[in-house]
Amino acid sequence: PKRLCKARAKIASSSNYPTYGVISYDLGGAAAPDGTGDTFISPDAYGFYPYDMTPDSEGNWYTIQYRWANGQAPNASKFDGTGTVPLGDDVSEIMFDTVDDTGGGYCIDISEEMGVIAVGFTGGESVTGVVRFYDMYTGEFVSEFDPGLTYIRDLSFDAAGNLYVSD
């Protein structure tokens, strides 16, 4: 896939709600983690609040960060899973950020067969209850649709490429 990297200015998260990035836990077959976990995606990669993430079959990670207002954070980011952990503290590990013109991104999933990322929006400044699709290789906007829901809380593709959305 073509890499589209760009420098990003770090925006400090709110002192009331600091972000710790994405933390990984080695469960080792146990029901609960033993320990505090390790930073997997750096808090420096987020200006605000990480909300959801999903990997692809190549080990790359797609994440979103929630912001209510437009223009404050990318709707989705893709991280090179072969990078050094924690991912995202080196700008070269950020394969792309999607446009940041719409707030309210809440959940994410990918369909490798269709080559798209689906982002569900809830409680944003201008878009609520909409699913937007982005190209999983470039981050370019592809299309969107309104499933008739008010607040999209989660979404998921099945093996046949159907999309399930919960309100």
Image: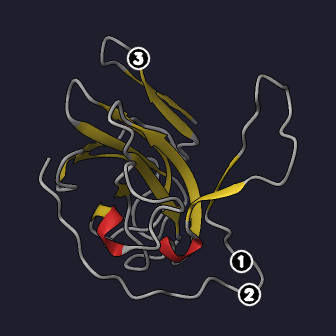
Residue under numbered circle 1: 18
Q: Is residue 142 above or below residue 47?
A: above
- Residue 45 sits above or below residue 83 on the image: below
In the figure, 131 relative to 138: above or below? above
Q: Residue 158 got which mark? A: 3
Vertical relation: 85 (above or below) 53: below
> In the image, which disc is placed on residue 15?
2
Q: Secondary structure at mark 2?
A: loop
Residues packed near mark 2 inside 10 Å, few (<14), some (14 to 19) or many (20 plus): few
Q: Residue at x 24, y 44 (%)?
A: 136
- Marks 1 and 3 sit apart, C-alpha to C-alpha, by 34 Å
Question: In the visual, does 147 lie left or right of 136?
Answer: right
Residue 91 coordinates in the image, percent (x, y): 34, 74
- Hey, which quadrant is residue 90 in on the image? bottom left
Q: Residue at x 44, y 67 (%)?
A: 88
Identify the secondary structure beneath mark 1: loop
Closest to the observer: 75 or 43? Answer: 43
Residue type, label 3? Asp
Q: Residue at x 19, y 47 (%)?
A: 137
Amino acid type, label 2 = Ser
Which quadrant would residue 113 be assigned to in this image? Answer: top left
> In this image, 15 relative to 42: left or right?
right
Mark 2–mark 1 CB contact (< 8 Å): yes
Q: Position of residue 129 (x, y in %)?
A: 46, 47
Q: Is residue 6 left or right of residue 166?
A: left
Tell me residue 127's x, y (percent).
40, 60
Q: How far apart are labels 2 and 1 at the CA level?
A: 6 Å
Q: Would you say 158 lies left or right of 134 here?
A: right
* Mark closer to the chain start, 1 or 3: 1
Callout 1 amino acid:
Pro
